[in-house]
Structures are given as C-alpha cells and as structure tokens.
Amino acid sequence: MTAESNSITLVLTTDERESVRTILNQTAPGHSAFIFGSRVVTSIQDQRPVKTHSDLDIALAEPPLTLAQMDAMREAFSQRDLPMRVDIASAADLPEEWKKRAWPL
C-alpha cells in the first residue's frame, strides 16, 4: 500500500506508517520526521518496485537527539514487528538532492 500526494508516493503501509509514528512520538517528541530514500518515489520515471527488504530511511529535524533518545528509539524499532530495518539520520546532514526527495512523516 502507498500514500500518495501530487507526484510523490510513499511506499509504506498504513499500519507500518502508524507504527513508525508511534515510536517517533514516544522516543523523539516534538521532532519533525521525514522519510527519504528508496521508499519515496517522486515521479512516474522513478516508479520502480521497492524490494520488501528495502530499509526505511528517516531524517529527524533539529535539535539533535540525546544518546538516551537514540538508544530508546533503536530499541523500540528492534522490538516492533516491521518488515524492514529503520535507519535514522539528521535532516541537517542530508545532501540537498536527498532533501528534495524527503517526505514528511
């Protein structure tokens, strides 16, 4: 299942998206989160099958997370029954090209 808006498609089921939001709200409240990478499709030409094992890349806006928050987030994602690995990055560290393909979560 995908979520679509204009020419952007997010390849994530509704349940997966809600699970991710729940974890982020519990471990990083007040942080804006964005999905980028292979699970964000931005055009018809970019439409390619997303492999079931493709990771989910999430960028978090400033301020940086504390080590305790990062540990809690990693632990929460490892315990959740998501069919993909979740990678967390700082939005400030993303290259400009990737920022153009980021989608708010």
Image: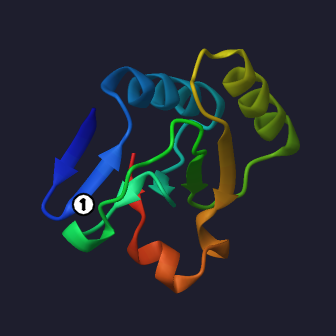
SS for dot 1: strand
In the rendered image, the vertical position of residue 68 relative to residue 23, given as above or below: below
Q: Which residue is mark 1?
A: 8
Dot 1 crowding, Cα within 10 Å, few <14, some 14–19, many 20+: some
The picture places residue 72, in percent across and down from the top left corner, at 78, 28
Left or right of residue 22: residue 92: right
Name the one closer to the observer, 24 or 100.
100
User: Is 13 left or right of 22, judged from the image as shown?
Assistant: left
User: In which quadrant will I find the C terminus?
Assistant: top left
Q: How are the residues colored?
A: rainbow
Left or right of 87? Residue 101 is left
Front one among 55 and 91: 55
Number of numbered discs: 1
Locate the N terminus and report the quarter of the image it occupies.
top left
Where 33 sits versus 21, above or below? below
- At label 1, the amino acid type is Ile
In the rendering, at what x and y percent does residue 91 appear? Answer: 59, 66
Picture coordinates of residue 73, whole percent (x, y): 72, 32
Viewed as shown, does residue 70 lie left or right of 30? right
Q: Which residue is at 56% across, 60% downward?
A: 61
Quarter assignment of residue 92 = bottom right
Q: Nearer the viewer, residue 68 or 74?
A: 74
Q: Residue at x 67, y 36 (%)?
A: 85
Q: Is residue 15 above or below residue 67?
A: above
Farthest left residue in view: 6
